[in-house]
Image (cartoon, helix red, strand yellow):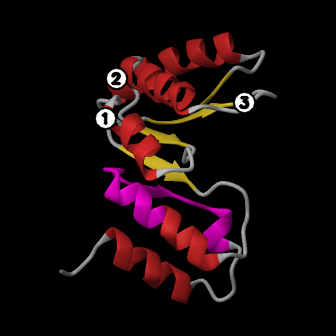
Amino acid sequence: MQVNFGAPEEAAMLSDLGVAVDQARALGLPLMCMSYVKRATPVTVEDLRHAARATADLGADIVKTSYPGTEEGFRAVVRSTPVPVLIGGGVRTDDEPAFLHLVQQSIAAGGAGICIGRNLFQRQPVGPLARRLAAILHPTG
């Protein structure tokens, strides 16, 4: 599911989330909600905290959200959300070191992992970056 807080369709998306949660529970399936804030004004950490917590409170088992730009900000999102929180990949970037640093920060802040598409799968070859991400997500210590 996806809920875009601040969008004109927010209320309908929240209602759909409630229905999907009930259906997923009846089937014994976990539900991930992509919880975003979509509006013309800048999105704050508090906006992301509210969105992530609200979707978790409505029954999402996992929340995917935007990275707020700082480790401290993401830590606040993670701490206020009672289910695992993943970051999305955001806008496509060719700055691989910056992208990997963002993933490292999200994990250091307590993030449960990543749910990333274009910033991984639109690279050729995919393997080298996938291995670097795996090393961040599953360090061998």
Identify residue for label 3. 38
Identify residue for label 1. 79
Front position in the image: 141 or 19: 141
The magenta segment is 103-121
Report the amino acid beneath label 2: Ala
Report the amino acid beneath label 3: Lys
Label 2, label 3: how far apart the Cα atoms are: 31 Å
Q: Secondary structure at mark 3?
A: loop
Q: Earlier in the sequence, mark 2 or mark 3?
A: 2
Q: Is residue 83 above or below residue 91?
A: above
Residue 119 part of the magenta-drawn span:
yes
Q: Residues within 10 Å of mark 1 (few under 14, many from 20)?
A: some
- Furthest-right residue in view? 40
Identify residue for label 2. 26
Quadrant where the N terminus lies? top right
Q: Secondary structure at mark 1?
A: helix
- Residue 16 location in percent, x, y? 59, 18
**Residue drawn 57% across and 44% down?**
66
The reply, left or right, for residue 15 in relation to residue 71 is right
Q: Quadrant of residue 94?
A: bottom right
**Residue drawn 54% across and 82% down?**
129
Q: Is residue 136 above or below residue 114?
A: below
